[in-house]
Image (spheres, helix red, strand yellow):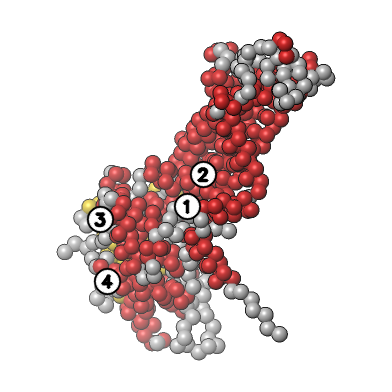
Amino acid sequence: MAPLLEVRNLRTDFRTGAGVVRAVDGLSYTVERGETIAIVGESGSGKSVGALSVMRLIPNPPGRITGGEVLFAGRDLMKLPEEAMREVRGGDIGMVFQEPMTSLNPVLTIGRQITETIEQHRGADRVAADRRAVELLRLVGMADPARRLKQYPHQLSGGMRQRVMIAIALACEPKLIIADEPTTALDVTIQAQILALMQNLTRRLDVALIIITHNLGVVARYAQRVNVMYAGRIVESGTAEQIYHNPRHPYTVALLRSVPRLDRPRQARLDPVEGQPPDLTRLDEGCAFRSRCRFAVASCARSAPPLDPTEEKGHLSACFRNHELGVAMASVA
Amino acid sequence: MTMVTPNPALSRASEEAQEIRRPFSAKVFGFIRRQPLGTVGIVIVVVITLAGIGANWIAPYNPISDHFSAMLQPPSWQHLLGTDQFGRDILSRIIFGARTALIVGLSSATIGGLSGLVLGVASAYFGGRLDLLIQRVLDIVMAFPLIIMALVIVSVFGTGVDNVIIAITIPLIPRCARVVRSSALSIREVPYIDAARACGFSHARIILRHMVPNVVAPFLIMVTAFVGQAILIEAALSYLGLGVQEPVPDWGLMLQGGAEEYAATAPWIAIFPGLAIMLAVFGANVFGDALRDVLDPRLRDR
C-alpha cells in the first residue's frame, strides 16, 4: 500500500536582500498510516519551512515552493487548487504550532476556536459542533470541558493551551498531524505530558504524526522513525534505535554528543557541534556539512552524497564514509 | 506573631465566581466605581442622543420661528439659556442642534471608520502590491487639507447635511485605515493567523473573524474619537458657511451668528453652543476609552 504522505524532492526558496536562501533543498521522506516520525535538526535546518511547505503555508513573497511533489493519500498537494487545499488544511492534516501562548486567538473563546474548524470542514451546526468540542476537550484530558469552552485563552496555562491546540488539530478526524516543536515553549514536566498525550491519542485514533523538534531526547521515546535534517535536506533516516545506537552520519554523531546524558559521568564535558550552520545562500555542489565535519575528505567537496542505504534495513545515510563511520563508532562504543 | 495572608489565587477565583453571579445593578455600580470618567462620558453621550432623538418633545420652543418681541434676552426662567438676535430660544436650538450634530457625527464616523477598517486590514493582510497601491491612494487623499476638500465637495454638490457628511467622511477614511493597518500588520505576524490558515479558513473568514476582532479596540477608540472630531469639523464648516445652512438649528451656525456682533452685549448666544460642542466632543472621547476597556476580554477581568 502506498504511504500516507510521500514528500519527494521538495524545494522552497526565500528571496531576500542577501540572495536566494534555499531553506528546503530536495527534502524527501515518507510517513505511513498511523506512524509517528520525527524530523530533527538545529535552528535554520529547514524543518519548519519543510512542514509549512507541505501545507502550502509559505508566505509568498518572499517564499516560494520551487519544485517537488507532496503526495498525500494519492493526491499531489502541490497541484491542488487553493480551494481544495483549504479542505486539506485542518480537515485531512491538522497542525500544532510551537507557541501555545500565541497560537490561539486572544479574543475568541476556546469553544469558538474549536467549533469554527468543525463548522468549516464538517458543515456541522452550532449545537453538534459544541457537543463535539466538549468531547474533544475531554479527549485531550481537560477537566470540566463545558466550562472551559466559555473561557478565553489568557485564562488557561501554557500546557492547557497546547491541549486545546491538539483538540483543534484533532477536531476533524485528520489522517495526519504535523506538530512543529509542540513542546519547546513548555515546562519539562508538561512537555512529557503533552508528548505522552499526543502519542496516546494518535495511536488510539490511528492518526499519523510528524514531530518536528531540535531535541533528540524528545524523539527517543515517541517516534518510530527519525529523520535528521541538515541544510534543507535529510542526511540520515532510520528507526530511533538505529539513530541512537548506530548513527551513520557525522552530523547525527555530533548532535548526539552535544546532548547531556544521565548515563555519562557528571564531569564529562558536553561536546557542541562546532562551527556555524552553513549560509544557505551560498551552498555549492558539495556536502553542506563538510566544513564542520571531522571526517571530511576531498570527495565531499565535489558532490553532495546521496541518501543511500547502509547495510542495516531501513537505515539511510547521506555520507560517503558511512560504512567506515559505522566501524569507527562501534570501536568507540 | 503570625499573620494570615489571604491566598491571592483563591481570592481571585472567588471574585471570578462572584462576577458570574452578581446582579445587573451591582455590575453597573462596579463599572461606575472603576470607570468614573467613562461613566461621565456615557451620561453625556446618552443625554445628547436622547436630546437629538426627542428634540420635538423636549425643546420648550420652536427652534426656527423668530420672535422679534423677545430678541437678545439673557438667560431667565422663561428662556433658560436666553434668546438670540431673532428671538429664538437658545436651549431649543441647542437641543435640535444635537440632532444635526449626531446625524453628521455618527454617519461620517461610521462610514469613514468602516471603510478605513476594511481597507486597512485588507492592506495589511494581503501585503505586497495591493498594500502599496492602497497606501499610495490614501496618501493622496490625505494630502488635501480638510477645508479644501470640503470646499471642493460643497462647490460640486452644493451645501446641505448629506454633502457635509461626504466632505467629513472622505478625509476620515485614510486616517482610520492607517491606524488599523499598523495594528493589523503586527497581528498578521502572530502565529494564530498562521494557525487559522492551517485550519483551512478562507481569506475573508480570517480577516473578518480573526484579524478584525483583534484591531477592534484601537478601532473603537478611533471611531468614537471620530464622532467628536466630525462634530467639531461640522461645526467649523457650518461656521464658515460651507456646511448646514440657516435656518436649520446647528451648533456651528449658532456660533457664527452670535460670535462677532454680540460677543460683548449678548455673550450667551455664543457661549452655550460652544459649550455644547465642547461637551459633545469630550463625552465622545471618554466614552470611547470606556468602551474599549469593556470590550477587550484581556482588560475586562482585571
Kindly state the secondary structure of the residue where label 3 is placed. Answer: strand
Which residue was labeled with disc 3? A71
What x and y, as percent, mark residue B257?
A: 71, 16
Query: Helix, strand or loop at disc 4?
Result: helix
Circles 1, 2 touching at the beta carbon (< 8 Å): yes
x and y percent of residue A27 in the render? 34, 59
In depth, the one of A193 and A134 nearer the eye is A134
Which amino acid, mark 1? Val
Question: Given the image, on which type of amino acid does mark 4 rest?
Answer: Arg
- Pointer 4: what residue? A203
Q: Whole-Å distance between the Cαs marked 3 and 4?
A: 22 Å
- Residue projecting furthest to the right: B264
- The residue shown at (62%, 40%) is B43
Q: Nearer the viewer, mark 3 or mark 4?
A: 4
**Which residue is disc 1 drawn over?**
A107
Q: Nearer the viewer, residue B127 or B20?
A: B20
